[in-house]
Image (cartoon, grey):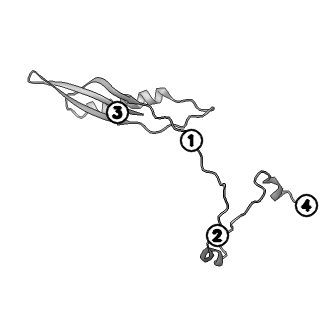
Amino acid sequence: MRTTVLFTREVENEIQSVTAHFLSHPQLVSSADDYDFDQLLSKSDQRVEDFNSRGSGFIFDSVTSFTLVVTQYRPLAGATYLPTPAKIAKKQAVINVKNSHHHHHHHLFNKTD
């Protein structure tokens, strides 16, 4: 989440304003895990409090921009066999498994011959 907030204060009968930008950490959302809006609000409130605690006298005025970024999560998965570079293979210290049975992994461990 990206939020832009306007803070104002009065100094010698003049209104001063400053814009602050806040970012939140990504959250993993899936069919098993909903978006935690309570955490989002809590973190946002904490960031505003941290900004105000610096003693500047600015007070929260308004949110001028709010962007919730949603992106599809694509976990990394092995999909291709890459041959071991010759220099590494010569050392015989690495096992590079080449599985030709992509959907039958259990056959690798249950062979009877």
Mark in front: 2 vs 4: 2
Give the residue at mark 1: 73
Q: Position of residue 58 (x, y in %)?
A: 22, 28
Say the numbered circle drawn on residue 47: 3
Q: Amino acid at mark 4?
A: Thr
Label 3 Cα neighbours within 10 Å, binned few <14 / some 14-19 / many ≥20: some
Picture residue at 56% right of the left edge, 29% below the top: 34
Q: Position of residue 44 (x, y in %)?
A: 38, 30
Picture residue at 66% right of the left edge, 58% below the top: 80
Say the numbered circle drawn on residue 112: 4
Query: In terms of image quadrants, where is residue 18?
Result: top left
Q: Are marks 1 and 2 in contact (CB under 8 Å)?
A: no
Q: CA distance from mark 2 to mark 3?
A: 48 Å
Q: CA distance from mark 3 to mark 4?
A: 62 Å
Q: Amino acid at mark 1?
A: Tyr
Mark in front: 4 vs 1: 1
